[in-house]
Image (cartoon, rainbow, N blue to C red):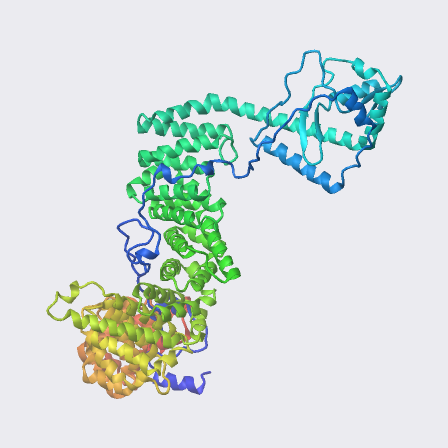
Amino acid sequence: MLSPNDKKLEKLDPFYRPSMSKQKTSAEIISEARNALRTVRTQRPFTPREDQRKLFGPASSRTPENRPPSSFSLHASSFESSDSRPISSARLSPLELRPKAPASPALEEDLCLSFPKPPVDAAKMRRISSARARLFRAASQGALLPDRTLPPAEPKKTVESKETVVKGDPMVKINGIYLTESNAMGHLKSHPLQLTYDGGFSEIQEQEMFKGTTSLPSHLRSGGEQGKRCSRASSYSSSSDVSRLEARAVSKANLQEKDTEIEVDEVFWNTRIVPILHELEKEENIETICAACTQLHHALAEGNMLGNKFKRRSILLKTLYKLVDIGSDLLSLKLAKLILALKVSRKNLLNVCKLIFKISRSEKNDSLIENDSILESLLEVLRNEDLHTNTEAFLYCMGAIKFISGNPGFLDEMISKGAVEILVNLIKQINENTRKCGTCLPNSGHLLVQMTATLRNLVDSPPARSKLLSISALPQLCAVMGQYMADKDVCTNIARIFSKLTSYHDCCAALANCSRCYALFLKVINKYQKKQDLVVRIVFILGNLTAKNHQAREQFSKEKGSIPTLLSLFHTFYKLDLCAEEQMGEAQQPKVQRPRAPAEDVLIKLTRVLANLAIHPGIGPALATNPHAVGLLLATLEYKSIEDCEELVINTTATINNLSYYQVKNSIIQDKKLHIAELLIKLLVSNNMDGILEAVRVFGNLSQDHDICDFIVQKNVHKFMIALLDAKHQDICFSACGVLLNLTVDKNKRVILKEGGGIKKLVDCLRHFGPTDWQLACLVCKTLWNFSENITNASSCFGDEDTNTLLVLLPSFLVSSEVKAYQYSPEEVKYAFLTSNAISS
């Protein structure tokens, strides 16, 4: 049962009316494009390709003095040799090792008779242990001490140890510890290296005791008073002596193991590396040197000599640095790859990144870069090096990667090697640092320009877009735009990324869920209102977000100043475009040959956003009652013709169509309906079918008003609508039939259908499109029903030929509707049935 309001609508039966709260039929879903409120499509803003590869293009907001250079000279002298030393090693000054002469018996006796010194305190022992540890560590890393400082000993002589050994009949006493004779021998043999401490530091003595003997030496076997006295004096520190002996034994074993490793490296160095270095020093020709570099890289990898821990690294780097002056791009790439593999740092890392950047500036070198796989080395720098200490090196490294990403042939390789993840991770680091410190890193803006430009190139690939969604990169990009709002280049690149991403449904939905993006975009518009290249992309993004997402329309409308900001932007670029039109003048070249003006492109995207927003029931009525909004739309139609700018005129007309849907109080559209109708006639008489279709749709909404119906008849617009029924275009026939339907609501205007063969054309539309388009068939039946109201004879109303045709068509539609009733609404079936009954009776 229909409500009173629904009955009123049923009586007037306008073409476009607000939809009832009922379930949509299949035909309505399929024909969604015909709805009164429609979104508008447009092309993505065009970004011209830069002629030259530079860090910052010609459109950059940075002045030459405020940005890093893209051109520079680089020579072997630019590199530092100090970086060739492993940074993990610490150089120690050599120690003076003074051999200690054996003491005389008298002196030995006096020493033994003197009172023993108290044990060293714990803190002092720790300092001594630390000194010894540093000593052995320095020795293991290359600062080796001399093996011996004592003069060669006589073959049969032994150096007397400061350890006193006393032998009794069953036991041997060493430093107060009683051992059996065999245990004593094993103990002494296992501790050949001894350190004696004189106060602070120590003297290192290597003593070889009891070589080739199976029993104690004879001079140690004879026990006497002197030996007993010395043994009593040494018994105070016996336990600590044994611990020190064991620690020294372990340290010496480790040192000997290190010496063994170095000897193996020395053999590999002399047999595999040195001959290649000799080849490089000859510098005979480029091909030979390049082949030698490749051979050297493979040999170093085989010998596990890559990285920054190898002892002879300095020799390698100095040789490689000298070859930079040759100036060959092919050779420089091989040198750069090898130098990066040796893990240089600081200034040398910067210089090698500059070297690759310089080579990558030439597009003809892309094939060399692909063959040498230098991309992996560059990504390795970004992945492993520290961002804070190598910002400038990262800048030129990213610059080279940006150039490479401009070649579509590299995209798959970059994505497979993790370029997307690496860049997003760096962006996260910059965001976190800015959030914690409250300030941006030095040169981070320059770096972000390169990173975002690279991402802009990567998002052309579907796998890259999938990765960006999977790692939640869009909120990070929004955060960067918010933190670097003052950097127009960064904002422009991110806008370019979003304009590409939002052209795809999944990416558009992901950005729409970032609630902060709407306020962010409005802030960018307000800050850069006259910067066309940035604003046009932001408006394009908003158009994509609001095209098919009702929630996005609502969220945007809730942002403070959203509609006023758009209207202010509309007014700014309307004035700019109007001035440009006036300057062109009539004496210039024909308008059809003029390129699209930048201001005009902004207006195209902006009217699209307004058309999309007008679909929202809370925004559309507000816009329809806004004099500023409607005034700008009408002004655009007044000074623009469809020949000048087809897309702008069609978008503007579509926006007016959406606003004219709302029959609200104080509607400016209703107040200016006659003026709008005058402007639409210009579109009707044009040769542009898209423009004609949009004009007819607006007439469909406006023709619900009696004044507009009178205007249509007075201006003979109805004849034009009847003529459009001959068009073999279903949407045009549908819209034209809707206008005629609204005209037939007035009994006095039903006679116009007989002009120009209107009845016959309606019947032809029913025959051609009715079996497959029941929405159109329903409109035709409604129009025929209105026309035939209160008739007494079908033949006198429709004519014999058309009556017979209808008597055949309508019953067939009723049979079809019974078979496929699930597809059609009761309204569609009802009008077919009523019309059939009226004719048959």
Position above or below: 96 against 630: above
Residue found at the far right of this picture: 169
- Name the one closer to the observer, 230 or 709: 230
Left or right? Give the position of 526 relative to 144.
left
Left-right relation of 796 to 109: left
Placement of the C terminus among the 4 image quadrants: bottom left
Q: Nearer the viewer, residue 685 or 743?
A: 685
Q: Residue at x 51, y 32 (%)?
A: 310
Is residue 614 something that shows in the picture?
Answer: no
Q: Nearer the viewer, residue 490 or 784?
A: 490
Please state which of residues 593 and 730 is positioned toward the viewer in this rendering: 593
Height in image: 356 above or below 46? above
Question: Is residue 25 positioned above or below 180 on the image?
Answer: below
Q: Residue 58 occupies which quadrant of the picture? A: bottom left
Q: Position of residue 469 (x, y in %)?
A: 47, 55
Residue 223: horizontal and vertical position, in percent?
85, 18
The residue at the point 66 percent across, 15 percent down is: 153
Q: Is residue 433 visible?
A: yes
In the rendered image, residue 389, in percent from the top left (x then y), is placed at: 48, 49
Which residue of the protein is positioned furthest toward the left in this rendering?
A: 587
Total residue callouts: 0
Report x, y in % for residue 646. 23, 68
Q: Quadrant of residue 203?
A: top right
